[in-house]
Image (tube, coloured by chain):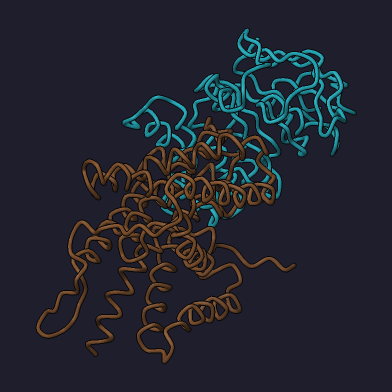
């Protein structure tokens, strides 16, 4: 039981990061109908910049504040240059461009920072706390959960309670009606990109100190796991992304903790994904019926 | 004259559907646009609101040329389109759809938009009862009410209304169409009404035009003989 409790808390902490990253993927999918394969590379680039500054002044906390700004700037830059020129309906080409951006960003990071592993220190202890003889979690994991939960709540409030959120939702789901209501859909798409890549950079700053460290490809695994969570929850559903992220985090931790070979953990996630897609091909929380093809 | 259109050409993929449309809409008048399917009625409305770029001709609204004004800015000038079929954002609630209509104006506290939304609830009482419901749960008639309501919250001076009776029961069609003269009287609203139900359209229109092959073939008063 103690082990189950430990794995559950740890799984929720990992899942919180996947949830934030998956949410960032959903925001771009809803705004532009593309999967941004460059999200991991952009977030790790933002983390490198934040880490560079943070090691000289301000530490991890300044880095946490800086990374989303750098991530947002990179995302907006990508959207307003390469992707906007493609036009709104060139989804396949846009995803190919995003894959190209991954290679370019990782090559540039390798040239500037090198390919070697750079550890990122946590701002508070990552040692597991033992409460009443039971291993629970570390103060850093608690911090990660708190920051991730705050981000998700902030995004939810932005979309539910603000004029900007209403504009973003209308532009993402009914572009023509949004334009007829006086909303600049192009501007909303740019804002969605900035918001999404900023969130992804936040997620990178939270997850990289937990042993992943900094390398140009450090976020590739997180991207794949978060993308799995996104498909699980439904590409159109922000709620699905968050719950999918938590579910994947839990499944990974349970599989790692209980399987005879921890390397089988990703298979458990793929099994969950397969089971869900067989029953709900558009994901658990995606609205509307599946389209027959 | 509120709206003046001269020699308007527009279409899709390089093929003109409108081929030299001339049209005038006075302030606070209901003008019915009639014609067979494919004559260019919907294309005319989509061009006037800016969703389609004209390939020739001029559109003047309130004395100002609209040629370079994007669709997002035309609603600020006072032009609102209620498209046929889906005119609502399915994911948003009734209240959010209506608020959407007022987002263009500088009204951070939302006071003026709230007043406009309250007026829509008075006009369309079923919407008031369903204000918290997502639009995809509404019936066809309620959706049409919501689409018109969203446009009215923008407080337009010219309402472009595309096939409001499409797929609706006759009592609901009558309720919507009798609303238009009321809005003309109370809000000074001009309406350009595209409608297949000729008798219903002529009953409320001050003037009517018939579109044939992308041109205005005939114009006259809306008196029903």
Where residue B83 sits, quadrant-wise, is top right
At 35% from the left edge and 32% from the top edge, which residue is drawn? B110
Relative placement, left or right, of A89 versus A273 is right
Q: Is residue B92 left or right of residue A13?
A: right
Q: Residue lying at the far right in this picture: please name it.
A: B213
Q: Examine the rendered structure and indicate whether residue B60 appears above or below residue B193.
A: above
When the figure is inspected, residue A238 is found, relative to residue A244, above or below; the finding is above
- Whether residue A32 is visible, yes or no, is yes
Q: How many marks?
A: 0
Residue A258, horizontal then vertical, whole percent: 37, 89
Q: Is residue A158 above or below residue A277?
A: above
Q: Residue at x 27, y 45 (%)?
A: A54
The quadrant of the picture occupied by the C terminus of chain B is: top right
Q: Which color was chain A given?
A: brown
Camera-nearest residue between A113 and A243: A113
- Residue A70 appears at what percent x and percent y? 39, 40
For this view, does B145 lie left or right of residue B53? left
Residue that appears at 29% across and 46% down:
A63
Where's residue B141, x and y in %? Answer: 60, 49
**What quarter of the picture does the N terminus of chain B occupy?**
top right
Q: Position of residue A185 (x, y in %)?
A: 55, 36
Residue extending farthest to the top is: B63
Tell me the colour chain B is drawn in. cyan
Residue at the image point whose x is 29% and y is 48% from the top: A64
Which of B67 and A16 lies nearest the eye of the viewer? A16
For the question of whether residue B126 can be seen, the reply is no
Query: Measured along the vertical axis of the image, is residue A81 above or below residue A246?
Result: above
């Amino acid at each position: 039981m103690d082990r189950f409790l430990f794995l559950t808390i740890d799984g929720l902490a990992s899942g919180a990061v996947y949830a934030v990253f998956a949410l960032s993927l959903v925001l771009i999918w809803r705004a532009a109908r593309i999967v941004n394969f460059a999200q991991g590379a952009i977030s790790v680039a933002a983390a490198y910049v934040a880490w560079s500054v943070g090691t000289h002044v301000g530490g991890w906390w300044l880095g946490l504040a800086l990374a989303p700004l750098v991530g947002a700037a990179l995302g907006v830059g990508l959207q307003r240059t390469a992707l906007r020129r493609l036009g709104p309906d060139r989804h396949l080409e846009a995803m190919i461009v995003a894959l190209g951006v991954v290679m370019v960003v990782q090559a540039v990071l390798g040239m500037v920072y090198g390919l070697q592993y750079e550890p990122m220190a946590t701002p508070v202890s990552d040692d597991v706390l033992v409460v009443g003889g039971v291993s629970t979690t570390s103060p850093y994991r608690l911090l990660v959960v708190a920051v991730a939960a705050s981000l998700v709540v902030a995004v939810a409030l932005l979309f539910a309670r603000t004029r900007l959120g209403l504009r973003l939702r209308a532009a993402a789901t009914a572009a023509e009606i949004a334009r007829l209501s006086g909303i600049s859909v192009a501007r909303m798409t740019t804002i969605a990109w900035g918001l999404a890549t900023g969130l992804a950079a936040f997620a990178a700053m939270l997850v990289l100190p937990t042993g992943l460290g900094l390398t140009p490809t450090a976020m590739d695994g997180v991207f794949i796991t978060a993308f799995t969570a996104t498909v699980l929850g439904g590409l159109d559903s922000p709620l699905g992304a968050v719950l999918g992220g938590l579910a994947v985090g839990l499944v990974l931790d349970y599989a790692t903790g209980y399987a005879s070979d921890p390397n089988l953990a990703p298979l458990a996630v793929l099994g969950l994904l397969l089971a869900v897609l067989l029953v709900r091909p558009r994901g658990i929380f995606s609205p509307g019926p599946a389209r027959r093809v | 004259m509120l709206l003046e259109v001269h020699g308007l050409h527009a279409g899709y993929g390089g093929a003109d559907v409108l081929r030299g449309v001339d049209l005038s809409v006075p302030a606070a008048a209901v003008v019915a646009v009639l014609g067979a399917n494919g004559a260019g009625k919907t294309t005319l409305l989509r061009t006037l609101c800016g969703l389609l770029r004209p390939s020739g001709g001029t559109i003047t609204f309130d004395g100002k040329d609209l040629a370079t004004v994007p669709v997002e800015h035309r609603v600020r000038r006072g032009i609102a389109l209620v498209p046929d079929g889906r005119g609502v954002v399915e994911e948003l609630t009734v209240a959010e759809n209506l608020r959407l209509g007022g987002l263009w104006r500088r009204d951070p506290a939302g006071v003026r938009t709230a007043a406009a939304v309250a007026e829509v609830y008075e006009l369309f009482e079923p919407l008031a009862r369903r204000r918290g419901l997502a639009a995809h749960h509404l019936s066809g008639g309620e959706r049409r009410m919501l689409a018109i309501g969203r446009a009215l919250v923008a407080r337009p001076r010219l309402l472009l209304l595309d096939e409001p009776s499409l797929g609706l029961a006759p009592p609901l069609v009558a309720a919507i169409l009798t609303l238009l003269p009321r809005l003309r009287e109370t809000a000074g609203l001009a309406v350009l009404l595209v409608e297949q139900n000729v008798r219903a359209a002529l009953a409320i229109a001050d003037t009517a035009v018939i579109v044939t092959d992308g041109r205005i073939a005939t114009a006259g008063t809306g008196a029903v003989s």
